[in-house]
Image: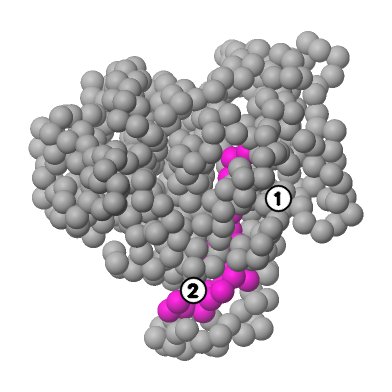
Amino acid sequence: MNSVSPSAVQYIVGGGAHEDRPSAQSRRHNGHGSAPDGLQEGSGEPDEVDRLKAKFMSAWNNVKYGWTIKSKTTFNKTSPLILLGQSYLFNSEDEVDRFRQAFVSCVWLTYRREFPQLEGSSLTTDCGWGCMLRSGQMLLAQGLLQHLMPPDWRWADCHPLTDVDFEVLKPRSPSRPAGMSLPSFSSSWTSPISQRDPSSGSSEDHRRTPARCPAASHEPQLEALHQKVVSWFGDHPSAPFGVHQLVELGKESGKRAGDWYGPSVVAHMLRKAVARTTEFHNLAVYVAQDCTVYKGDVMKLCESPLTQELSESWKSVIILVPVRLGGESLNPSYIECVKNILKLKCCIGIIGGKPKHSLFFIGFQDEQLLYLDPHYCQPVVDVTQGNFSLESFHCNSPRKMNFSRMDPSCTIGFYAQTKRDFESLCSAVSEALSSSKEKYPIFTFVEGRGQNYGLEGQSGGSMDGPANIFSCNRMSRNNKRGSTDEFVLL
């Protein structure tokens, strides 16, 4: 059993980094020549050179990741698409619209620029280094929507889809590349709205009235709650799940603004952020240990009284499972297993990506993953203002990528509202895991409690201690592990 060191995960494996990583020099440089690191990392106000650099980086980033000149995403009319446990077959316009409502209603969190300076640095943007934090935010946001909103909730102001085609695609054959379209209908369904910047804020083309979702409820209370959830992820020091707060939590494990964050570290940061917030007390986050979800640990975490005044004995829970699905690339044997997990309604997505940058996976069609991309750099939105615009927090340009490009390092998320839901989750996920062609599953559910549970109170494991992530066959352990992102190959 061969362990993968942090350096291998970040550099050799490539995708373990998931980031378009700036060099240490570039990310620490604050525009004042070759000053020592202590000065470069100081908290002085960013000058005009810094602002110009940030704007240039933002513009280049948007070109690099295809947000300036966008290509269309093609969907197969004859194959079902899975999105967060729901199936869609694009054989009618009504079905396309049902997918549109569900996709656009997902919270989309991306790079931002010109936000308040991060403490201990001169950074006012996370462009180039914060995509894993944004992917983690999107996973948590999806969990909160499931926790707080009705199951059939849809954003009432969702826009039509852009940059998409719906065609008949035949299965792959040796003589024809995968994805070649063979249209059988006279035309493809395309969006009635012109292509536009996803952040759409002020230009004339963006001022048209959004299409109302027929099935969406425009109840003021739900829309206010929707806006409140988004505000928790705002780029402001007071936002409980914003970049400022996550960077502060990262300092507890030796990270700082501008550093690389792996999917496992981000999982623990989200756990701590939820544990420390005062916004709600009926939700907990559990992070799996050793490729294992210990049911006893989850039960103890969730059965604790909510408050001293209330006797209710169950908290809803978000379960995060850091895994590694291969060595330098994804083991194809796990693809069917990942598909079956994404089919489950209890799955709230996967934070991972492809080599050198992170993505948030929320579904699939055929051999392609559906994802939300955090790499679009947008101006900051002041979420402290009442009725701030929600448009830049929702994406109407779905994107796909082949499973073969998926980086093996990722964190899978699940949500269970009640104790019965948790029991059903254990059963459904275990069945999905059994579909793997490999001898050992991606991870397992076991009775009892893990060794490290309780070291930080209600934690589910230490963020700063050893990773304790190893192959699920448990034939041996590597005692030299020292990082929460140091995985052992499955």
Disc count in the image?
A: 2
Q: Is residue 107 magenta?
A: yes
Query: Where's the C terminus, which quadrant?
Result: top left
Left or right side of 445 for 120: right
Between circles 1 and 2, the one closer to the viewer is: 1
Residue 118 has which mark? 2
Where residue 308 appears, as percent x and y from the top left, is 26, 53
Task: Say which quadrant the N terminus sits in.
Answer: top left
Circle nearer the N terminus (1, 2): 2
Which residue: 42% across, 62% down?
246
Magenta span: 103-126
Residue 382, compared with residue 310, is above or below; it is below
Residue under numbered circle 1: 391
Instruction: Determine the main secondary structure of the stretch shown in magenta.
Output: loop
Specify the amino acid type for callout 2. Leu
Q: Residues within 10 Å of mark 2 (few under 14, many from 20)?
A: many
- Residue 420 on image: x %, y %: 31, 25
Query: In the picture, residue 112 is in which quadrant?
Result: bottom right
Decide which of 375, 343 is in the foreground and name it: 343
Q: Are marks 1 and 2 in contact (CB under 8 Å)?
A: no
